Image (spheres, rainbow, N blue to C red):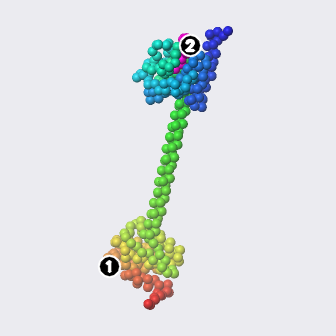
């Protein structure tokens, strides 16, 4: 016949085999319930987990969860549950203010087993015998050991679950950040495309005849725009092998000494590429600036209006205007 010590050692061995790294919390709780009912001869066992100050029944054995009290409010001070297993008999008040079996079943001996992970209460186990066999001090000691193993397994699993949840939150945040960066990049590309279009429209080099280009300028001209004008015009001269370039400044709001000097320099650069610049739309103010700066207009041909500039350009390339009479 098996002695009490041998039984205790057998139970300890069973408890020590409780896995510390099971796949999920439900599996851990199911294994723990199996050991409680099988090794300690309890007809009913319920494991409650604590969250937000409430004990919620997660698994039960011997009774369906629908037959037990599924939620139990914690005492104002959870420490009143104790750090170790407590037992009581029929008619005695347990550590909770309510009976998980709601008085429906004749529990003769009851054990309340708190599950602590350091200062944190993870849960509570209700174990009951319907036969009048009270839990012994040896049972209580083994319950305490079992609670420690369950706490370790739950702490590891909960920590892993929190890590996975945190990782999922980080991944979701990274996806949102990547989407935002993609939107910003797309918006920047769209803005750059618009700017390029605006720049191209602000300095359009038009081919109006064979080897004749027209550059109409409108609005204000600053240093940045002058750089664009120079680049576009010289590029157009090279591409179309232009002989004449008409720069129409009729629509320019104002021309200062810097702009006037830059236009003369542009005409000199065009001349080096073999093209003559015709500057049309010169007003008295511009003429005065050119004279005051002592700039030479030998590098360009000044005209008052675009029609005169077109006639000069066509003559320069040995073309003639073709008119139709009605």
Query: For residue 48, which numbered disc appears in the image?
Result: none
Q: Nearer the viewer, residue 199 or 162?
A: 162
The image quadrant of residue 264 is: bottom left
Which residue appears at 54% of the width and 19% of the height? Answer: 127
Q: What stretch is highlighted in magenta?
A: 126-138
Residue 110 inside the magenta-drawn segment: no
127 or 243: nearer the viewer: 127
What x and y, as percent, mark residue 214?
45, 77
Q: How many labels does the image show?
A: 2
Res 271 visible:
no
Q: How much space separates mark 2 and mark 1, taking CA atoms?
A: 119 Å
Above or below, 57 against 93 in this view is below
Q: Seen in the image, is 170 located left or right of residue 17?
A: left
Report the residue that reaches farthest toward the bottom. Answer: 325
Helix, strand or loop at label 1? It is helix
Give the residue displayed 49% in from the left and 56% down from the top: 186
In the picture, the disc for residue 284 is 1
Return the disc, 2 or 1, that comes first in the chain's sequence: 2
Q: Can residue 13 be seen in this view?
A: yes
Q: In the picture, which quadrant includes the N terminus?
A: top right
Give coordinates of residue 305: x percent, y percent.
38, 81
Label 2 sits on a secondary structure element that is: loop
Residue carrying label 2:
131
């Amino acid at each position: 016949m098996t002695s009490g010590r041998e039984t205790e050692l057998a139970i300890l061995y069973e408890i020590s085999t409780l896995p510390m790294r099971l796949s999920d919390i439900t599996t851990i709780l199911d294994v723990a319930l199996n050991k409680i009912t099988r090794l300690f001869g309890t007809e009913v066992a319920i494991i409650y987990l604590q969250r937000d100050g409430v004990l919620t029944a997660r698994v039960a054995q011997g009774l369906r969860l629908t037959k037990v009290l599924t939620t139990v409010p914690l005492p104002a001070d959870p420490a009143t549950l104790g750090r170790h297993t407590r037992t009581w008999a029929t008619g005695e008040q347990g550590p909770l203010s309510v009976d998980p079996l709601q008085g429906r079943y004749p529990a003769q001996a009851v054990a309340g087993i708190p599950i602590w992970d350091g200062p944190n209460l993870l849960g509570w186990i209700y174990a009951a015998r319907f036969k009048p066999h009270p839990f012994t001090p040896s049972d209580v000691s083994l319950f305490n050991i079992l609670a420690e193993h369950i706490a370790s397994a739950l702490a590891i699993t909960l920590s892993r679950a929190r890590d996975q949840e945190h990782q999922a939150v980080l991944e979701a945040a990274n996806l949102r950040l990547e989407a935002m960066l993609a939107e910003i990049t797309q918006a920047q590309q769209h803005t750059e495309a618009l700017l390029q279009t605006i720049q191209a429209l602000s300095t359009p080099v038009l081919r109006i005849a064979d080897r004749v280009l027209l550059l109409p300028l409108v609005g204000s001209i600053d240093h940045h725009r002058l750089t664009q004008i120079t680049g576009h015009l010289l590029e157009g001269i090279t591409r179309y092998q232009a002989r004449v370039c008409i720069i129409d400044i009729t629509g320019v709001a104002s021309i200062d000494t810097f702009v006037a000097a830059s236009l003369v320099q542009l005409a000199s650069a065009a001349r080096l590429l073999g093209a003559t610049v015709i500057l049309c739309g010169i007003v008295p103010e511009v003429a005065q600036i050119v004279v005051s700066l002592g700039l030479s207009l030998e590098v360009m041909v000044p005209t008052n209006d675009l029609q005169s500039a077109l006639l000069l350009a066509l003559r320069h390339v040995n073309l003639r205007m073709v008119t139709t009479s009605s």
